[in-house]
Amino acid sequence: MLYSQVGINTPQPNSTLVVEGSYEGAFRKTITNTTLSILDQYITAEGSSPLTITLPDGIVTNPFFGRVYYIKNNTTQNLTISGFGGTQLLKIDGTTNLTTYTVPAGSYVQVVKNMNATITLPLWDLSFVAASLPGNVKSLQYSRTLVSPIDANTPNNSVVHIGNLNIGYNGTTAASSGTIEYQLNVSSPVTVWYKKAGTGGTNLDVYGQTAAMAGYWYKLAYQTADNGNNINPANRDASETILIVHATKEVYRITSNVNGDIAASGSVPAVQSAVTLFVEKLD
C-alpha cells in the first residue's frame, strides 16, 4: 500500500497536506436566498433584508464528510441557516438539534458536514460561532486571584494586576483581620467608594478621595484604628469597591471575599481559609 504526503512550498511535508503560505478559497457574496454547493467555501450575506442560506443535501451517494462552510452575516437583519429541504438537522450543541439556526447581524458561523447520513440524525455541526459587538459595546476586562490558605505568603500571592491597578490583601493569618490595598502604575487623584458586610456586625458604606503616587500602596478604606473597615476572615467578610483613576479616566470594580477555616457540617466538607479578589476594568 502506497502512502504519500503533499507539500506546497516545503520539500518535507509531515502531514497529508502541508501548505507553507497562504491559500485561496472560493468567496461569494449573496444578496438573495441561496443554496450552497460544492463550489462554495466563504460566503457573506449582504444587504438590508433577512436572508436564508440553505446547506446542500447531506444524504447523497458520494458523501462529503468534513466539508466546511464559513458564513458571515453582513446584513442588517437576522440570517437563517437552514438544513436542506427545511427538514435536515443541524447539531447546535451537545443536546440541541434544529432544522434552522439564526445568525444575528454582524455575526459569523462555521458549519462542517459530520459523519451522519441518516435523515433522523443531525447532518451538520456548528463548529464555531462568533458574535461581533456594536462599536459602543466593549468586552469586559477582568482579573482574579484565589489564595488558600491565608498565611505569610498571602500579601504577595494575592496581588492582582489589571490596567494601571494592582490590588492585594495584606492579611497573614485567618485568625485576624487584614485590609485590601491598591497600587497605581501612574500618579493620579483617586476616588474610592467602599462597601463591606459580614457577620461581625459592622457593615460599611464609605466614600473617600486621595492623591495616589505611582508605586505606593494605599488602603482602600484607611483609618488609624480598624473601626470595622478591615475585612475579617472569621466573619467571612465580603467587600465591593468602585475605584476611579482620574488621570487616565479608568474605573475599576473590586470584589473581595475572605473566610477563615470552616469546619465540616454533616455531609458539607470542611474548607480552608482563603481570600478571593476579583477585579474588573469597566471602561
Image (tube, helix red, strand yellow):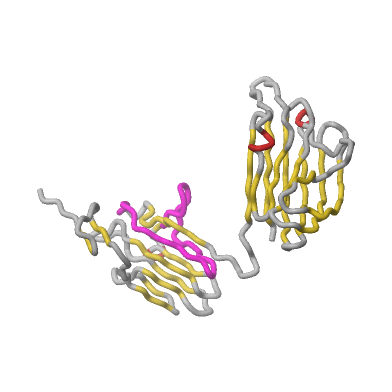
Rendered image quadrant of residue 82:
bottom left
Rendered image quadrant of residue 198:
top right
In the image, residue 57 lies at what x, y percent? Answer: 32, 64
In the image, residue 185 lies at what x, y percent? Answer: 69, 54
In the rendered image, the vertical position of residue 138 relative to residue 176, given as above or below: below
Nearer to me, 43 or 91: 43
Nearer to me, 214 or 76: 214
- Quarter of the C terminus within the rendering: bottom right
Residue at the image point whose x is 70% and y is 42% from the top: 168
Residue at the image point whose x is 44% and y is 57% from the top: 128
* Number of residue marks: 0
In the image, residue 20 lies at what x, y percent? Answer: 29, 62
Nearer to me, 104 or 169: 169
Say left or right for 238 vs 108. Answer: right
Residue at the image point whose x is 26% and y is 61% from the top: 60
- Magenta stretch encompasses residue 104: yes
Q: Which residues are magenta?
A: 90-117
In the rendered image, the vertical position of residue 187 relative to residue 202, given as above or below: below
In the rendered image, the vertical position of residue 7 relative to residue 171, given as above or below: below
Residue at the image point whose x is 76% and y is 53% from the top: 213
Say left or right for 134 vs 70. Answer: right
Say left or right for 43 vs 181. Answer: left
In the rendered image, the vertical position of residue 154 relative to residue 182, given as above or below: above
Nearer to me, 135 or 42: 135
**Going by the picture, which residue comes out furthest to the left?**
1
